[in-house]
Image (cartoon, rainbow, N blue to C red):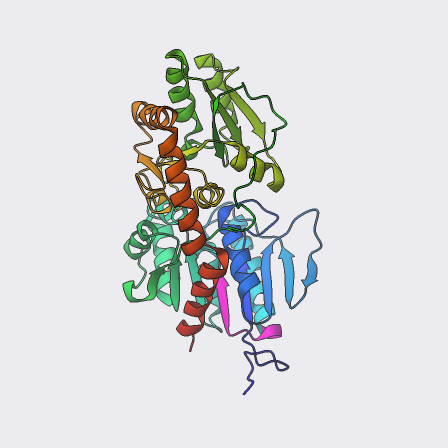
C-alpha cells in the first residue's frame, strides 16, 4: 500500500540524495552517489552543488536534480560564512523534504551533509563514508564532535573500505550500524579491447605506466616519477603518463625537471572519459602508490577497479584503503608509497616479468566483473539502505 514516503502511482520508495559533490563535479565520492541514485528502485531528488553549465533544476526520467549554492569553506559552523552555508543547505533540505516526503535521505558524507540532515531531523538518513573527511575531522575536537553527532543519528553508515569503517567507528559511528560496501566499476565499458594509438607520443617498445587522478600529494605521482628516473638510469624503457589536474601540479612538474625525465614523463592534464579508457587500454601498468599526507588518505580508489576492469595490474600504496581495492600479488602489488625503492622494485618486477603483468591483469578483471560491477554493489547498498529504514 502506498504511503507518504512512496510514489503514489507505483508504490516505490522515494529517496532524497544530498551531496555537495555530484557529476559533473569530479570525484569518486560523487560518482559513487550518482551510481546509487541511478540504481535506486524509486523516484529520486538529488540536492547538490550548483554548476555554471547546468540548470539549477532539471529532470532525468524519474529523477530530479536541484543544484544550490553549496560552499563550505569550513565544516565547523563557527564563522558567519560557514553558518550561512549550513543555513542555505539546511533550508534547501527542509524544502525538499516537505515537497517530496522521501523515505530516506542519503548523505554524501557525515559532514557537512549528515550534520544538516540530523539538524532537520524529519526523515531517517544514511551517510556514505569515504575516509578523508573522517581523518580531517579527527584533527579537530570541534569537527570530531560534529561528525560524532552526525554518525550517532544515522540509521546506517556505509564505508567504502574496512579501513574507512574503522575510522568511522573511531569517529563515533555505531559498529552495529556501520557496514562496508565499496564503490564499483562499469566493467562492460572498460572491457579489454585492442589498444589504439594515444594522442601523445610514446616511445616504441616502452612499458607504459599510467596514473589517473587529481594531482595532489597523497596520489604520489612524484614518488612514481622518482622511481621511473631510477629505472631509466638503469636502462629500462619506461614511459609514464599522468592524467589529471590539481594543486600538486607544480610539485609534479618540478619533479620531472629535477629528475630530467621530460622525455619519459607526459602530463596530459584533464582528459575526457574516452581518453581515460584509452589510457587504461594502452597502458601496461596502472600505478598510484598513495600515501597519507597530513589527514588526507585514499579511502579506496575507484581508479584501481577501472584499471582492473580493463585487464591491467595496479601498484597501490599501503596507506588508507587502497590495499582493499588491489589484492597484493594477485591483482597487483601493494607497496609502501613513501619508499621510492619499493615503487622501483614493483615497476621493475612488472617490466622483467610480463607474464606476471598479464596474470595479475586477468585476475583483476575477473574480480572487477564478479565482485565490483556497479549493478552488484549499487544493489547491495540500496538494499542495505531500505533495510535500515524499515
Residue 276, how many percent across, how many down?
A: 57, 38
Report the front residue among 305 and 127.
305
In the orientation shown, which residue stands out farthest toward the bottom? Answer: 1
Q: Is residue 231 visible?
A: yes
Residue 138, how many percent across, how many down?
A: 33, 47
- Tell me the residue at 44%/69% (across/down): 383
Query: Relative to residue 133, is residue 101 depicted above or below?
Result: below
Magenta stretch: includes residue 99: yes
Report the front residue among 285 and 72.
285
Residue 152: quarter of image: bottom left
Residue 63, how many percent across, how many down?
A: 63, 65
Write down the region rendered in magenta: 98-107
Query: Relative to residue 21, is residue 310 depicted above or below?
Result: above
Residue 321: quarter of image: top left
Q: Is residue 116 visible?
A: no
Side (left or right) of 351 relative to 43: left
Residue 331, how many percent across, how many down?
A: 36, 42
Indicate the quadrant containing the N terminus: top left, top right, bottom left or bottom right: bottom right
- Tell me the residue at 60%/29% (across/down): 198
Magenta stretch: includes residue 322: no
Amino acid at each position: 500500500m502506498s504511503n507518504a514516503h512512496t510514489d503514489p502511482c507505483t508504490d516505490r520508495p522515494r529517496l532524497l540524495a544530498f551531496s555537495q559533490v555530484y557529476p559533473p563535479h569530479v570525484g569518486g565520492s560523487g560518482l559513487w552517489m550518482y551510481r546509487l541514485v541511478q540504481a535506486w528502485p524509486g523516484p529520486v531528488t538529488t540536492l547538490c552543488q550548483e554548476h555554471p553549465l547546468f540548470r539549477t533544476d532539471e529532470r532525468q526520467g524519474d529523477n530530479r536534480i536541484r543544484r544550490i549554492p553549496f560552499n563550505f569553506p569550513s565544516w565547523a559552523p563557527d564563522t558567519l560564512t560557514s553558518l550561512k552555508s549550513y543555513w542555505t543547505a539546511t533550508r534547501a533540505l527542509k524544502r525538499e523534504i516537505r515537497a517530496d516526503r522521501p523515505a530516506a535521505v542519503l548523505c554524501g558524507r557525515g559532514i557537512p551533509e549528515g550534520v544538516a540532515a540530523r539538524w532537520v531531523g524529519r526523515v531517517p538518513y544514511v551517510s556514505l563514508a569515504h575516509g578523508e573527511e573522517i581523518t580531517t575531522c579527527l584533527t579537530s575536537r570541534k569537527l570530531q564532535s560534529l561528525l560524532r553527532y552526525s554518525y550517532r543519528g544515522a540509521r546506517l553508515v556505509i564505508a567504502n573500505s574496512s579501513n574507512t569503517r574503522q575510522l568511522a567507528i573511531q569517529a563515533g559511528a555505531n559498529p552495529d550500524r556501520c557496514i562496508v560496501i565499496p564503490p564499483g566499476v562499469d566493467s562492460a565499458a572498460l572491457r579489454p579491447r585492442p589498444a589504439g594509438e594515444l594522442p601523445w607520443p610514446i616511445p616504441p617498445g616502452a612499458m607504459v605506466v599510467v596514473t589517473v587522478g587529481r594531482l595532489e600529494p597523497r596520489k604520489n605521482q612524484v614518488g612514481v616519477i622518482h622511481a621511473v628516473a631510477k629505472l631509466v638510469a638503469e636502462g629500462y624503457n619506461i614511459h609514464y603518463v599522468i592524467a589529471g589536474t590539481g594543486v600538486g601540479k607544480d610539485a609534479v612538474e618540478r619533479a620531472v625537471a629535477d629528475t630530467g625525465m621530460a622525455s619519459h614523463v607526459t602530463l596530459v592534464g584533464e582528459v575526457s572519459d574516452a581518453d581515460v579508457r584509452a589510457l587504461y587500454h594502452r597502458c601496461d601498468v596502472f600505478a598510484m602508490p598513495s600515501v597519507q599526507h597530513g589527514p588526507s588518505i585514499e579511502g579506496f580508489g575507484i581508479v584501481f577497479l577501472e584499471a582492473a576492469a580493463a585487464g591491467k595490474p595496479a601498484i597501490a600504496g599501503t596507506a588508507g584503503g587502497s590495499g582493499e581495492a588491489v589484492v597484493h600479488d594477485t591483482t597487483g602489488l601493494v607497496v609502501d608509497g613513501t619508499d621510492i625503492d619499493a615503487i622501483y622494485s614493483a615497476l621493475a618486477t612488472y617490466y622483467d616479468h610480463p607474464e606476471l603483468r598479464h596474470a595479475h591483469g586477468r585476475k583483476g578483471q575477473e574480480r572487477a566483473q564478479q565482485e565490483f560491477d556497479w549493478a552488484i554493489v549499487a544493489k547491495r547498498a540500496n538494499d542495505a539502505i531500505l533495510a535500515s529504514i524499515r
